[in-house]
Structure formats: structure tokens, C-alpha cells
Image: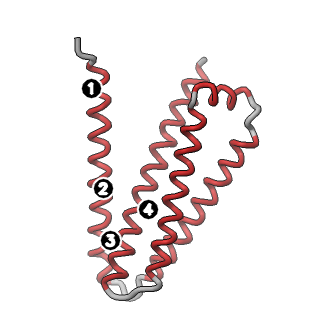
Amino acid sequence: MINKTKYMTLLGTLITGLLRVIAVCSAFYFAFIGLQDFGDIRITATTLIALSGTLTGFIMTSLSMLVSTADRPFMINLRQTGHFQNLVNHLLGSAGMWVFVICLSFSVHLTNGSTQQIILSFSMAMMLYSLMYFLSAMHKFRLIIIQLARG
């Protein structure tokens, strides 16, 4: 007999992935079109740098808090179930994407013309993707916490 739950989960994952790709491509397109009317898009790049830097700082703070509470029963339970490593990987992945956004946004200051628009549009699309990645990880972590709190 076919395990319908397994295939529905796979279908849901594929649909979610497709929606993420559509959202990121749309963000790139609309950012590129919208940036054509800007006088100086370096201001937008600077804003992305500040936002990404702040979010990366929050991630590093949360990682240090996780490490400092490693001896707590809840954290021991997370490690035993394997969820701790998954959470840390997702947090580091999010921080890495935000550092990439910072690098891209810095490179906007080194270029001009349509190259600036393309790089900044890609940076904005990457910012959207990294936020979706982070929110997805936090949703999974929320479900884990609820499950572990029940027993």
C-alpha cells in the first residue's frame, strides 16, 4: 500500500520550494524595475547592509545563548533528539546568507549604471530568500519546542 502521508509531505515540500523560487524571482524583477526610478540606489544598498548586519548580530547572540545553556535539561533533550544541530545549522545558514547580502550590497558602491541595479536587485532577492529560510527554520523550531514541552 502506498504511504499517502509520505507523498503528501513531498508534494508540500515541492510546492513550498516552487513558491519560494517564484517569490525570489518576482522580488528580483520588481526590485530591478523599481530601482530604475531611483536617483541614488546606494542609499538602498546601505539600508540592506545595516539590516543584514543587525540580523546577523541577533543570530550570533542567539547562538551564544544556546551555547551558554547547553547543560540545561531542555538543551540536552534537543541534542539527544538531533534537533540542536539542525537548529544551529539553520541559524548559521541564515547568518551566512545575510553576510552574503552585505557583501553584495557593498559591491553596489563600487559599480554604476545598470550593473548597480542588477547587483542590488539580486541582493534584495537574496535578502527575501534568507528571511524565508530563517522564518522556516524558526517555524520548525517552534514545532519542536511545542512537541518537547508536551512530553
Amino acid type at mark 3: Ala
The total of numbered circles placed on residues is 4
Residue found 32% across the figure and 71% down from its top: 31
Q: Earlier in the sequence, mark 4 or mark 2?
A: 2
**Quadrant of the drawing holding the N terminus:** top left
Q: CA distance from mark 2 to mark 1?
A: 24 Å
Horizontal placement of 87 versus 7: left or right? right
User: Mark 3 or 4 closer to N-term?
Assistant: 3
Q: Are marks 2 and 1 in contact (CB under 8 Å)?
A: no
Residue 32: % across, % down: 30, 74
Tag 1: amino acid: Tyr
Chain-order first, disc 3 or disc 1: 1
Q: CA distance from mark 3 to mark 2?
A: 12 Å
The residue carrying mark 2 is: 23
Judging by the rendered image, the residue that carries numbered circle 3 is: 31
Q: Position of residue 140 (x, y in %)?
A: 49, 36
Q: Is residue 79 above or below residue 125?
A: above
User: Secondary structure under badge 4?
Assistant: helix
Q: Residue at x 74, y 38 (%)?
A: 69
